[in-house]
Amino acid sequence: MNEALAGIAPGNGETVVVGLSGGVDSSVSALLLKRAGYHVVGLFMKNWEDDDTDEYCSTRQDLIDAVSAAEVIGIDIEVVNFSAEYKDRVFASFLREYQAGRTPNPDVLCNAEIKFAAFLDHAMQLGATRIATGHYAQVRLFEGLFQLMKGEDGNKDQSYFLHRLNQAQLSRTMFPVGHLYKREVRRIAAEAGLANADKKDSTGICFVGERPFREFLQRYLPLAPGEIRDLDSERVVGRHEGLMYHTIGQRKGLGIGGLKGMADHAGEHDAWYAARKDMQNNVLYVVRGHDHPALQSGRLVAGDLSWVSGRAPHTHWVYAAKTRYRQPDAPCSIDVVDASRCEIVFAEPQWAVTPGQSVVVYESKVCLGGGIILSSGE
C-alpha cells in the first residue's frame, strides 16, 4: 500500500471532493486519499434523467455502489444533479454535431464542462481546495506550469478525454490512481473489502447506454434518407436513413448486400466501408476494402483548439497525435494556422480520420491539448 500512496502528496487534513461514480477507480481514489491524510468527501453526479431506466442506464445501481463504497471507506457522500447543465453544455452540442454530419465525442466535452467545471465549482462551494477523479492520468508541475501526463497504465490511459483541461482546472485536480495499473487498483479494492472490486468498467455515455444508437438518435433528429454510392464508380449501392447514423470507417450497419453485375470488379469480395459524406446532396459514399486510399489521411485541419499550457505548441517540431481513443501515438508535426485552427501533418497516413472527433497532441508522455477535427486530406 505504501507504493500506492507514493504518487500522492500527504494530505494534512486538506479537503478533497472525490467524484464517486460507483466504479472501482473512483472508489480506490477516495480510499487512497483518505489513507494519505486528506479529509475526503464523496460526490455522486447525476447527469441524465430523460429516460433513466435500469434497462439502459445504470445510474441507480451506480449510486448504490457509490454509497456502499463510501460506507466502507468511512466518508460522507452527497448526490448532486447536473442534468440541466449537461443538457445545455454537452447534449445540445452532441445533437448539433450529429445533425451537421460529424461524429462528436461527448465524453471530452463532459469532462471540460461538467466534471471539471460544474463539479469543480460545486466542490469549491463545499469548502474543498481540490477535486479528484478516478481517471488514469497524472498532473505534474513543471517550470511553473501544470502538465497533463499520460496514466502509467498505457492500456487505461485517459488523457485523451482530458485534453481540454486548462491550468486553473489542473491546479485543483488530483488523479490518485493515475500512477497505478488497473490490476493494482482492483487488488487494493479487494483487500479493502470494496464490493465493486471486480465491477465491469463502464463503456460509452450514459444517455445512450446499451440501447441501439440509431434508435436513440431518432428520438431527437428526424430521418433524412438518401443514397449510398460507391465512391469509385458513383454507382448507387444502397440507401441510408440519415448521414448522422454513419461515421467514417464504419463497416457494420451499412445495409449493403451483394450487388449483381459487379462480379467482374476487382475487390468484389472486400467489405464496404463508409468513406465520405456529401452533406449538400445527402449522399453517403462507400469504398471496398479496409486499406482503400480514400480511408487514408496524411494530414488534417483541426479547430476549437485547446492547449493545456494556454499556449500553442511550436510549429514543425516532431510530436505525436491520436485521432481516436486507443489509437497508437502517430508521429506528426503541427502548423498552427491561427488562434483557432491548425494543420497536423502525419509521418504516415492515418486510417479513417473522422470530422467531429478529437485530435490530441503529445510530446512523449505530456498531453499538450488538441482540437476538433474539421477535415482531412492526403
Image: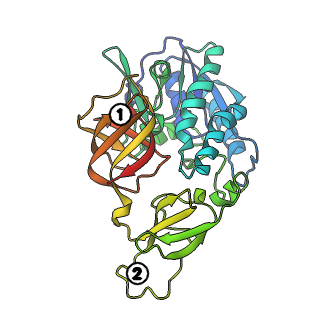
- Farthest-out residue, front: 280
- Quadrant location of the N terminus in the rendered image: top left
The colour scheme of the drawn protein is: rainbow
Q: Do the residues labelled 2 and 1 touch (CB within 8 Å)?
A: no
Residue 173, compared with residue 376, is above or below; it is above
Front one among 345 and 14: 345
> Around disc 1, counting alpha carbons within 10 Å, would you say few (fewer than 14), some (14 to 19), or many (20 or more)?
few
Kind of residue sitting beneath label 2? His
Front one among 48 and 14: 48
Q: Is residue 132 left or right of residue 375?
A: right
Q: Earlier in the sequence, mark 2 or mark 1?
A: 2
- Quadrant location of the C terminus in the rendered image: bottom left
Residue 53, compared with residue 22, is above or below; it is below
In percent of the image, x 37 and y 23: which residue is there?
Answer: 311
In percent of the image, x 48 and y 76: which residue is there?
Answer: 235
- Horizontal and vertical percent position of residue 23: 58, 40
Real-space Cα separation, disc 2 to disc 1, in angstroms:
42 Å
In percent of the image, x 63 and y 57: which residue is there?
Answer: 213
Q: Nearer the viewer, mark 2 or mark 1?
A: 1
Front one among 222 and 137: 222
Residue 326 can be seen in this image: no
- Horizontal and vertical percent position of residue 283: 54, 64
Residue 287, compared with residue 313, is above or below; it is below
- Horizontal and vertical percent position of residue 169: 50, 22
Looking at the rendered structure, the secondary structure element under dot 2 is loop
Looking at the rendered structure, the secondary structure element under dot 1 is loop
Can you tell which mark lies on residue 269? 2
> Around disc 2, counting alpha carbons within 10 Å, would you say few (fewer than 14), some (14 to 19), or many (20 or more)?
few
Q: Is residue 320 left or right of residue 191?
A: left
Kind of residue sitting beneath label 1? Val
Pointer 1: what residue?
Answer: 337
